[in-house]
């Protein structure tokens, strides 16, 4: 799973150094991995769910192997995650986009106004299941995760 994100998050590390950082990451240990795979255990995409409170979650570390990118696998997995979270009565699902936000807009996410962006160029986005709850003044926007 960790290797899928090496090209995006490996910076100037060797693969071994990067994997060691991942294995020792408290962020990765605290989240819940969701993995899209076939019956032969070939992995197509993965993401990490972070639960911040009873009604607020984050989706992070979205990754797909290079050979399987641009085929909709990450979108499929995100949709499944949103279904799961809706069943758990989660109201707000955040993510920080390191790619073009339009990818996530197609899945119901909206970019927070510039005033609420803390980590540009990563864009904080939210999916609110009940659009009546979309009030940036009262939302508990999580730090980058």
Image (tube, grey):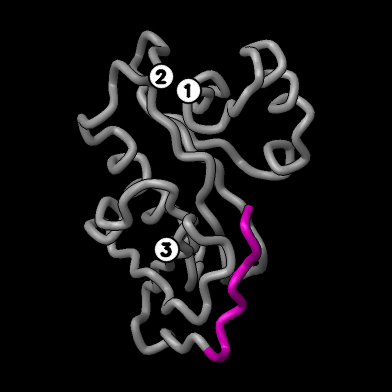
Q: Earlier in the sequence, mark 3 or mark 2?
A: 2
Dividing the picture into quarters, in which one does residue 134 lie?
Answer: bottom left
Q: Does residue 31 appear to the left or right of 37 in the view shown?
A: right
Residue under pointer 2: 43
The mark that comes first in sequence, 1 or 2, is 1
For the residue carrying disc 1, how many other residues have a C-alpha within 10 Å: few (<14), some (14-19), or many (20+)? Answer: some
Rendered position, 23 above or below 118: above
Q: Which residues are magenta?
A: 137-145
Image mark for residue 114: none
Q: Which residue is mark 1?
A: 4
Residue on which the image places disc 3:
86
Q: Residue at x 32, y 56 (%)?
A: 101
Q: Tell me how far mark 3 sits from mark 1, CA to CA.
A: 27 Å
Q: Residue at x 41, y 19 (%)?
A: 43
Is 134 located above or below residue 88 in the figure?
Answer: below
Q: Quadrant of residue 75?
A: top left
Instruction: List x then y, in percent, for residue 25.
Output: 75, 34
The answer for how far apart the CA atoms under marks 3 and 2 are is: 25 Å
- Label 2, residues with CA under 10 Å away: few <14, some 14-19, many ≥20: some
Asked whether the residues under the numbered discs 1 and 2 touch, taking CB atoms below 8 Å apart as contact, a structural biologist would say: yes
Q: Nearer the viewer, residue 73 or 15?
A: 15
Q: Secondary structure at mark 1?
A: helix
Q: Magenta segment, principal secondary structure?
A: loop
Dot 3, how many residues are within 10 Å of its Cα: few (below 14), some (14-19), or many (20+)? some
Measure the C-alpha gap from mark 1 to mark 2.
10 Å
């Amino acid at each position: 799973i960790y290797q899928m994100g090496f090209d995006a998050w490996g910076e100037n590390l060797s693969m071994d150094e990067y994997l060691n950082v991942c294995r020792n990451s408290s962020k990765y240990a605290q989240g819940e991995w969701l993995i899209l795979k076939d019956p032969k255990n070939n992995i197509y995409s993965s993401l990490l769910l972070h639960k911040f409170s009873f009604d607020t979650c984050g989706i992070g570390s979205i990754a797909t192997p290079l050979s399987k990118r641009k085929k909709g696998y990450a979108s499929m997995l995100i949709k499944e995650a949103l279904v799961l979270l809706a069943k758990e009565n989660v109201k707000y699902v955040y993510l920080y986009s390191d790619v073009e936000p339009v990818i996530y807009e197609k899945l119901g996410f909206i970019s927070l106004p510039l005033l609420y962006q803390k980590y540009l160029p990563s864009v904080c986005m939210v999916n609110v299941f009940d659009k009546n709850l979309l009030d940036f003044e009262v939302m508990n926007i999580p730090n980058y995760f």
